[in-house]
Image (cartoon, helix red, strand yellow):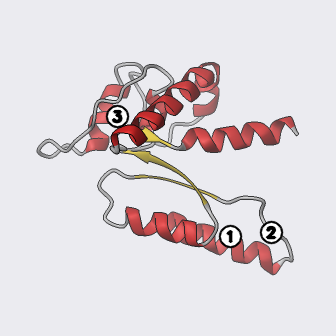
């Protein structure tokens, strides 16, 4: 909800200057957040675009290295996101949340990740199970189009 609330605040602030953003994206993950559905609905009601990940943003990073649709679930004290991050560390040993220079480290593998994300999203729709999948590739596609213009 904090991400969506901040998006709404920025939209208001921008409109106070007589401007309007072309698009506002909210990037957040499912993990075990109780307000995930509410935040998704509120973002859509406010004409925001979503770049969500199930279970976590690190799934998007993992797709730079491999394709996987094996669901991540809570096991005892480890959340679905914990398990996804554990798998990611098979490829990126010292990965840490809020990693600095993440784009530079992953840029060479972006096309592979985009292909994997689209494949995961297609399978998620077919199976009606979003875990795991991501929408981050939609934001990346939008940003790539901006750089070409």
Element under label 1? helix
Residue 5 lies, in percent from the top left, at: 54, 72
| First of labels 1, 2 by sequence position | 1
Query: Which residue is drawn at the image coordinates 47% and 20% (left, top)?
Result: 65
Instruction: Classify residue 33 as left or right of residue 113.
Output: left
| Whether label 3 touches label 1, CB < 8 Å | no
Hey, which residue is sitting farthest front in the picture? 126
Q: What is the distance, in whole Å, between disc 1 and disc 2 at their CAs?
A: 10 Å
Element under label 2? loop
Instruction: Classify residue 145 as left or right of residue 60.
Output: right
* Mark 2 nearby-residue class (10 Å; few <14, some 14–19, many ≥20): some
Query: Which residue is drawn at the image coordinates 24% and 45% (left, top)?
Result: 79
Instruction: Classify residue 2 as left or right of residue 49.
Output: left
| Position of 71 relative to 89 (above/below) | below
Tell me if residue 105 can be seen. Answer: no
Which numbered tag is attached to residue 60?
none
* Mark 1 nearby-residue class (10 Å; few <14, some 14–19, many ≥20): some
Residue tagged 2 = 20
| First of labels 3, 1 by sequence position | 1
Residue 107 lies, in percent from the top left, at: 64, 25
Q: What is the distance, in whole Å, between disc 2 and disc 3 at their CAs?
A: 37 Å
Which numbered tag is attached to residue 10?
1
Query: Which residue is drawn at the image coordinates 48% and 29% (left, top)?
Result: 119
| Position of 64 relative to 47 (above/below) | above
Tell me if residue 14 can be seen. Answer: yes
Element under label 3? helix
| Marks 1, 2: nearer the viewer | 2
| Marks 2, 3: nearer the viewer | 2
Residue tagged 3 = 85
**In this view of the protein, which residue sits in the foreground, 124 or 149?**
124
């Amino acid at each position: 909800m904090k991400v969506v609330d901040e998006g709404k605040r920025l939209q208001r602030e921008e409109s106070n200057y007589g401007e309007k953003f072309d698009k506002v994206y909210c990037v957040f993950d499912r993990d075990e957040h109780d307000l995930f559905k509410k935040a998704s609905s509120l973002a859509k009601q406010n004409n925001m675009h979503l770049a969500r990940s199930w279970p976590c943003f690190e799934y998007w990073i993992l797709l730079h290295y491999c394709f996987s649709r094996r669901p991540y679930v809570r096991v005892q004290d480890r959340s679905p996101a914990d398990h996804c991050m554990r798998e990611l560390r098979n490829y990126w040993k010292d990965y840490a949340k809020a990693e600095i220079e993440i784009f530079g480290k992953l840029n060479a593998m972006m096309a592979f990740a985009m292909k994997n994300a689209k494949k995961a999203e297609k399978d998620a729709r077919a199976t009606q199970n979003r875990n795991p999948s991501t929408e981050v590739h939609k934001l990346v596609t939008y940003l790539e189009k901006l750089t070409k213009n």
